[in-house]
Image (tube, rainbow, N blue to C red):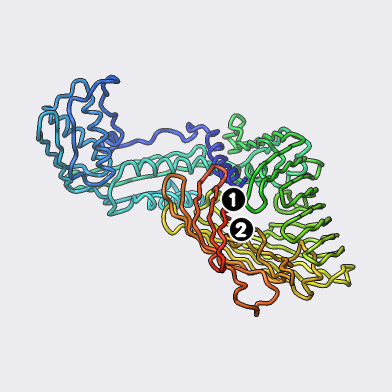
Amino acid sequence: MKNLLSLLRLAAPLAILAALPTAALGAEEAVPEDAAKAEAASSAEAPERQDAGETPEAEIEVADAPDDEAEDNVEAYLRALSARKSFSEERDDLVREACEKALVPYGWYSPEIEVRHPEKGKIEVRIGRGERTLYREVRIETAAESPEEGRIAAFAREKAAEYGIEKGKPLIHPQYESFKSDITAKLISDGYFNGKITNSTVVVSREEAKADLSFTIEPGTRFTYGKITMEGFEESHGAVKGLVSVKEGDLFSALDLASVNQTLYETGYYKSVIVRPDMREMDSGNSLVPVRIGLKAKPRNLTEWSLGYSTDEGPRGSVSWKRPFAGSRGQSWKSALSVSGVTQAANFSYYIPRENPIDDYYRLSAEYRHKDLNDTEFQNLTVGGHYFTRTHGRWERDYFIETSFESYDQSDDSDDVFLLMPGAEISRLTTDGTTDPASGERIRLSARFSSEKLLSAEDFVILDAFYRRIWSPTDGSRLVIRAEQGAILGSSIDDVPSSLRFFAGGDQSVRGFGYEKISPKNSDGELTGAKYLTVGSVELQVPVMNKVRMAIFADAGTATNDYGDDSDDIKVGTGLGVRYISPVGPIRADIGVGVSETHIPIRLHFGLGLDL
């Protein structure tokens, strides 16, 4: 979903800009004759190519080109030249002319071209670069200096600096053309539909190897939003009206419209959202442009099926049923059933928006879970109410009250426990939005407590902190670190239900050890679960071929009731792995070795999904 939203962030402003006619920019800017010749050289059509299947008459090699870009352009021109039917290797003047045309766009106006014939059918071209043409003067301004026009001029100067269009920098025509395109796009994006570039000249002095740039923008009047109309899926309009941040009379901005487009799509109510300015109804006299918001509802009922496998839980499958829009306030609900060799679960969640359905809502939930693993078996029914908000900063906050009834057997300990647990969880995810992030960070902190004064059977507090970070030390590589710390305070471990105790080991814990097999044991050697959890991991991934990286890792951790116990409680696993970068995220295969043990265990681990 995050990858899809990342694509929408890019696509929405482009779609909005595509709806705007480029003719709105006004007349073509006038260019002096000398500049016209220079620009013509940068966009000269390649010589006519020979018919498909004909063999070039001569092989042409280039030596001593000024730089890689210029060399690539020279080679492209010469390949086209050698493919002409009329070309003869004796026509050195054509070779020189092609080289000169190819070098001009990169500021080499006076090169020295030497053409040699080392053997029949072969031409060697040596290029003496001469003096490169540099900008002597760069003037970028607007027709007037009102605050709005001054802002456009400042943007143009900043963009020129990004492209290296500054005094003393080389004249590179492709960069200049890109600069002009960016200014044109900025005028349209910010609603200057009558804006134009009134002067765009580059005057080149070949003798001095200098260029003077004069660039003038006349933005004109900035348009504002006219009437804003929502169309389609009428029953949802009241629920999302507050998410439309643009208002009639506000200054036009394509980026703001793109933000509205993205926000409405993220509600999950719609199969498609199209937010676009209605250029047909645009009122140039009053500088107004109406906005139409087209909404298409998702199907009333959505079902999803999935199958998978992990070395922790074996084969697994799930099915979910969702109602994306279930009330005039934007309510929705989802139910799901999941089954694996270890855990079986069924849950239901009902969402009630507060301020908006994306970042501020209530959730009522109920879940039944059965787990049978190692020396642990329990059945748990949890019913809770949550308030989720992300309206202040990047931190997501979940405040909740849950009631839990659990019947469990943990080694030689059995009990039926009722708990009422208030708690909170805050988390933050920072990523580039791709399925294979080059950088990112996840932080999660949670706390919950149980008290006999609140009708619970036991008194305790559970704290848990999780951190994961990804870096890219070099292009294509990944460095992943992970750490988790948990603690149960105020109660004997024997009084805490199995589902809340800590265990370590497995794909996402300490590799080289079985899933949740790191734990204190009773006198019979059975796992009891622990009050404390400490886990850390470092992993380096290095590219070895397209979409494949090798990984080397070291994990360490323990689940214990007393950190003062024997140091043998710390388990260490190291190993090697492979990462295949699939469209849905990395597919992981690891061989983990429990090097801390006397009898060293070796385990194969599989996984699928984001490293975050």
| Structural crowding at the residue carrying mark 2, measured as other residues with C-alpha within 10 Å and reported as few (<14), some (14–19) or many (≥20) | some
* Quadrant in the picture for the N terminus: top right
- Of 494 and 350, which appears nearest the observer? 494
Q: What residue is pinned by disc 2?
A: 508
Residue at 61 percent across and 38 percent down: it is 288
Q: Quadrant of residue 116?
A: top left
- Of 221 and 168, which appears nearest the observer? 168
Going by the picture, which residue comes out furthest to the bottom? 564
Q: Which label sits on residue 32?
A: none
In-image side of 37 versus 452 (left or right): left
| Structural crowding at the residue carrying mark 1, measured as other residues with C-alpha within 10 Å and reported as few (<14), some (14–19) or many (≥20) | some
Q: Position of residue 412 (x, y in %)?
A: 80, 66
Q: Position of residue 56 (x, y in %)?
A: 21, 25
Q: What residue is pinned by disc 1?
A: 607
Q: What secondary structure is found at the residue carrying circle 1?
A: strand
Q: Position of residue 21 (x, y in %)?
A: 51, 32
- What amino acid is at disc 2? Gln
Asked whether the residues under the numbered discs 2 and 1 touch, taking CB atoms below 8 Å apart as contact, a structural biologist would say: yes
